[in-house]
Image: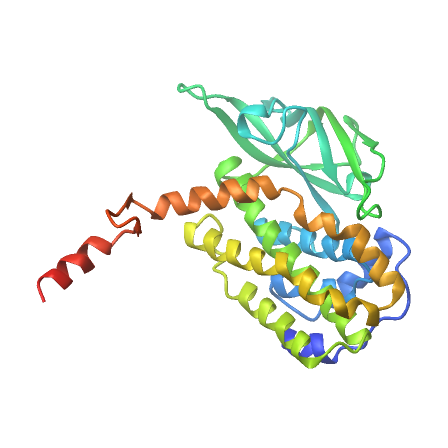
Amino acid sequence: MDSVFDYLLTAPLYETPLESVADAWARHRMAAARFEKPLDVAIAGGFGADRLGYAFLSGYQEALRALVPGLSAEELVAVAATEAGGAHPSAIRTELVETAGGWTVRGTKSFTTLGIMARRVLVIATTGVAADGRSLLRAALVDIDQPGVTVTNQPPLPFAPEIPHATVTFADARAQPLPGDGYADFLKPFRTIEDVHVLAAALGWLVRVARAGSWPRSTLQQLLAAVAALRGLELDRPTSPGVHIALGGLLEQFDRLPAELDSLWRLADPVDRDRWERDRPLLGTAGRVRVQRLDAAWRSVVVTAAPDGEANYPGNGERASAKGGS
């Protein structure tokens, strides 16, 4: 099995441009055959992409496979969570219903990435309301190519226009429910898992740009160090406060990266440079949600404010007592 770091530094640079999502997915599958872990596949897939949008495709797909390990390695899959009122659990109106003939889904998802290109969608739906008024959510896999599913493409976004988005309507479409809570086990962790895998793929793509443009060794070292930091996150615990806080630090570093690389883009292919300027907003989507998630993580580990104004963390009291007794 390859080292992903050696792969980034020695794999041949693809020269054939990618003309479609299908082309990008075929190249991604070639990289996926060399690695086992979804995160490493995302990194290698991003390296093989010729633009940030297709690197996003690699990260998004491998995030889904990290979330649902049983997904086929061959098919494109999408998450269908967002509705007219958003993706918060209280905004989800799509229903998952058990009938005599099996489970079905009915409702409308207003924004589904990949849209018509996906073969299956992971739908987040409600099965009813708990005694406390909380919506009971489940996740279910739904085949797109069946009666009862209507996909309506939306206009391309101004960034990464190659990645389609669609409205998907389910009219008692057959569904395969997955075990677990739709929010705690799927929707909530996916937000973190997706951030990590998309960032990893973007770093893989930047390594390709750096090698193609003969950027300095120090820049390649910096990019590989960022890859190493991502691989060090405990992704088996994506809702851990510590993981969120560590990821917050990595995202802040990545936010500073464009300015640090600004002078090097003159060495890059002009097409790569223009696409980078166009597609950079892709990496800032869901920024408000990330801030809220990071704040919540800090609140869960900061118990009180100490008299001197410093944050008081679990265990600080024991250390203070030990100092006082010495």
Indicate the position of residue 220 as horizontal and vertical percent values.
68, 75
- Outermost residue toward the left in this view: 325
Q: Position of residue 244 (x, y in %)?
A: 48, 51
Residue for point 73% across, 48% down:
281
Where in the figure is residue 246, as x and y percent of width and height?
48, 57
- How many marks can you see? 0
x then y, percent, for residue 239:
46, 47
- The residue depicted at 55 percent of the width and 41 percent of the height is 186
Quadrant of the frame with the N terminus: bottom right
Q: Nearer the viewer, residue 211 or 191?
A: 211
Is 215 located above or below residue 114 in the figure?
A: below
Q: Does residue 1 appear in the picture of this structure?
A: no
Q: Nearest the camera: 9 or 221?
A: 221
In which quadrant is the C terminus drawn?
Answer: bottom left
Above-or-below relation of 203 to 302:
below
| Quarter where residue 55 is shown | bottom right
Q: Residue at x 54, y 24 (%)?
A: 90
x 57%, y 49%: residue: 67
Residue closer to the observer: 280 or 107:
280
Q: Is residue 117 visible?
A: yes
Comparing 191 with 321, the one in front is 321
